[in-house]
Image (cartoon, rainbow, N blue to C red):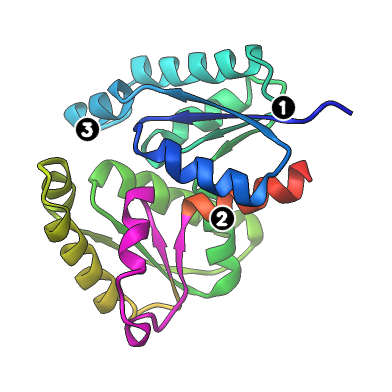
Amino acid sequence: MKPKTLGLIHTSATLVPVFQQLCQQMLPGVNVFNIVDDSLIKDVISKGELTSQTARRVVDYVGSAEAAGADHILVTCSSIGAAVEAAANLTSVPVLRVDQPMADLAVQTGKRIGVVATLPTTLEPTSDLVKRRAAAAGKEIELTSRLCEGAFEALMSGDAARHDQMVADALRELSKQVDVILLAQASMARVVDTLDEADKRVPILASPPQAIKHLAEVMG
């Protein structure tokens, strides 16, 4: 039986090693390839939204991944989620947006759900996804969204410590108000490891491990 192939589409090269490690752990024996184009996320940030032109390029990349032989395709950026869902309808292999398994788990975990992001362009699509997944599951939820204003800019300018501090503060505060917290960006996951156990009052979910765990189940 020939090994399965997973195509990963990223909008940041920094996510390649993150997913490489997760795939080695959870998807042994699966061939993995990466497509990276950071102009996609740069365009979303500069325009403040996902434009139809950028969405079309996302759809093209998903088509390229299918043509390259992917049995499953995972798009690792939450900001382009709407385009990923559009691409899934045009592709004959399963296409997953990175935050869907995390959103599903959150909906199962509790009623009061918190979403933390460092970019408004990610906060909106992730919050929207959680609402839709809750509706699909027939669950009532209360959603609290928190934007860490300026944290993404700090990270981009090389001040990772300031970014981490702002995200950590938001997580501590939000954990007193909700049953479960979602990190809207994969880049925030490392901050969870820096928190004291006492600050982790509720489950804090990051999309990369949840997505790969889900793929391990379906590709198994």
The image shows residue 215 at horizontal and vertical percentages of 67, 45
- Residue 58 visible at all: yes
Q: Circle 1 — which element?
A: loop
Left or right placement of residue 179 versus residue 213 in this view: left
Task: Point out the tag, 3 or 1, that comes first from the N-terminus.
Answer: 3
Quadrant (top left, top right, bottom left, bottom right) of the N terminus: top right
**Which range of residues does the magenta coloring cover?**
181-206
Residue identifier under label 2? 210
The answer to whether residue 185 is magenta is yes
* Amino acid type indicated by mark 3: Ile
Q: Classify 10 Å Cα crowding around label 2: few (below 14), some (14-19), many (20 and above).
A: many
Q: Secondary structure at mark 2?
A: helix
Name the residue tied to disc 1.
71
Mark linked to residue 168: none
Is residue 186 or residue 194 the one in the foreground? Answer: 194
Q: Point out residue 120 in the picture as x, y percentages from the top left corner.
A: 24, 46
Which residue is found at the position 63% from the left and 25% from the top?
89
Front residue of 128 and 193: 193
* Mark 3 and mark 1 residues within 8 Å of each other at the beta carbon: no
